[in-house]
Image: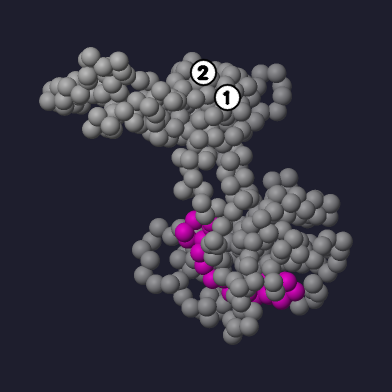
């Protein structure tokens, strides 16, 4: 690492940008090559070092992949992470670290310039045995394997670009499992929500914040993390039309630009937010804790119709109810926070319009006390 950085510094002192020798050979003009040679003081004690710097003969740093991953997180992606919360950074890092750890377990903590296609194939073969096992064990989803390859490929590419070697061939190129079938999360049927979930006393024993988050999801279609991380200033109850403002925060990003939206509060969701007008500090930046708590609450009470249902099924139910009520596609995208591929000619309608449209799908909660 030091030798490479020293060569880059020395090249700048000579009046050049450090360029690897193979790029000089292909791209530099004869005049540039001669100018680089002319800078070498043959009689100097450091002539060899000057030549190495001018002609790009020092191999870029050979940090082990574990160290390269640290550089990737702390330097290369620093700007990408600056607006994420601590929990978001942790989640972002977790899956990428898994890919690196899997590689190290199989191939060792190799220097980045020692990783070859044979190592990438070794990882592929290992995943193949887990995705399509022949010993009767339960197969893992190929999506997990593909995430590993995406993360290893990106780490390799961005690390070497950071070192100034953008043309280095990526050993993880084009490795992925095809024909992956993704299992959609099914929605709760409306009758199920009405007869099983919107029942007085069904959540007795569950803490108030977790209970209210469930109810807040039903008539807003928000992501659980969007509700759990609401700030008091984004819960607008003293308004002609009570609503939630789903907004990015100083240290928390939204999932996408289209997730930035205003959602009217109706029915049981309005009741829930009036019960928790300051939000849900118990679960703020604690998505894993919230997920575990709600999943356990639903399983122990028999509120999942199938093994494929999740808490996220409430969001899918909201979307399905809007579809079946024939709400406009653009409005559905705006309310759910999805990207709309149609041209956007307005703001998605006033709060009053959104409230009136959503009133067509509101479930009966008159009997429910929160």
Magenta run includes residue 272 = yes
Q: Quadrant of residue 163?
A: top left
Magenta run includes residue 314 = no
Whether residue 47 is situated above or below residue 65 in the rendered picture: above
Q: Position of residue 151 (x, y in %)?
A: 51, 34
**Residue occupying image coordinates x 31% and y 28%:** 10
SS class of the residue under badge 2?
helix
Quadrant where the C terminus sits is: bottom right
**Residue occupying image coordinates x 39% and y 72%:** 346
> Is tag 1's residue or tag 2's residue first in the polypeptide sequence?
1
Q: Quadrant of residue 144?
A: top right
Whether residue 168 is situated above or below residue 202 in the rendered picture: above
**Residue occupying image coordinates x 51% and y 18%:** 119
Q: CA distance from mark 1 to mark 2?
A: 8 Å
Whether residue 41 is situated above or below residue 330 in the rendered picture: above
The residue where tag 2 is placed is 119
Quadrant where the N terminus sits is: top left
The magenta region covers 253-276
The residue where tag 1 is placed is 103
Tell me: 116 left or right of 143: left
Tell me: 38 left or right of 51: left
The answer to whether residue 191 is visible is no
SS class of the residue under badge 1?
helix
Q: Which mark is residue 59?
A: none
User: Do the CB atoms of the residues marked 1 and 2 lie less than 8 Å apart?
Assistant: yes
């Amino acid at each position: 690492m030091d030798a490479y950085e020293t060569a880059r510094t020395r090249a700048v002192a000579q009046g050049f940008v450090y360029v690897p020798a193979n790029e000089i050979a292909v791209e530099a003009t004869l005049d540039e090559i001669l100018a680089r040679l002319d800078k070498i003081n043959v009689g100097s004690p450091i002539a060899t070092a000057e030549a190495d710097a001018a002609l790009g003969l020092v191999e870029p740093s050979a940090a082990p992949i574990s160290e390269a991953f640290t550089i990737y997180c702390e330097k290369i992606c620093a700007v990408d992470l600056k607006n994420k919360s601590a929990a978001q950074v942790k989640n972002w890092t977790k899956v990428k670290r898994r890919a690196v750890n899997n590689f190290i377990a199989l191939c060792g903590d190799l220097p980045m310039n020692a990783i070859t296609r044979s190592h990438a194939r070794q990882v592929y073969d290992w995943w193949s045995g887990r995705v399509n096992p022949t010993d009767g064990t339960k197969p893992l989803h190929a999506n997990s394997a593909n995430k590993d390859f995406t993360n290893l490929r990106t780490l390799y590419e961005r690390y070497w670009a950071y070192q100034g070697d953008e043309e280095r061939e990526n050993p993880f190129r084009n490795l992925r499992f095809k024909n992956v079938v993704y299992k959609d999360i099914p929605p709760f049927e409306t009758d199920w929500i009405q007869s099983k979930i919107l029942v007085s006393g069904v959540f007795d024993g569950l803490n108030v914040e977790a209970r209210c988050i469930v109810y807040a999801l039903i008539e807003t279609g928000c992501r659980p993390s969007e509700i759990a991380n609401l700030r008091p200033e984004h819960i607008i109850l003293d308004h002609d039309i009570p609503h939630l403002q789903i907004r990015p925060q100083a240290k928390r990003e939204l999932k996408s630009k289209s997730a930035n939206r205003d959602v009217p509060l109706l029915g049981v969701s309005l009741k829930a937010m009036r019960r928790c007008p300051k939000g849900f500090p118990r679960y703020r930046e604690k998505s894993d804790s919230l997920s575990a708590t709600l999943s356990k609450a639903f399983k122990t009470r028999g509120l999942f119709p199938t093994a494929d249902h999740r808490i996220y099924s409430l969001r899918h139910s909201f979307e399905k109810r809007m579809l079946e009520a024939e709400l406009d596609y653009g409005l559905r995208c705006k309310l759910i926070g999805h990207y709309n591929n149609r041209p956007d000619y307005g703001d998605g309608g006033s709060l009053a319009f959104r409230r009136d449209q959503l009133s067509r799908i509101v479930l009966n909660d008159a009997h429910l006390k929160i």
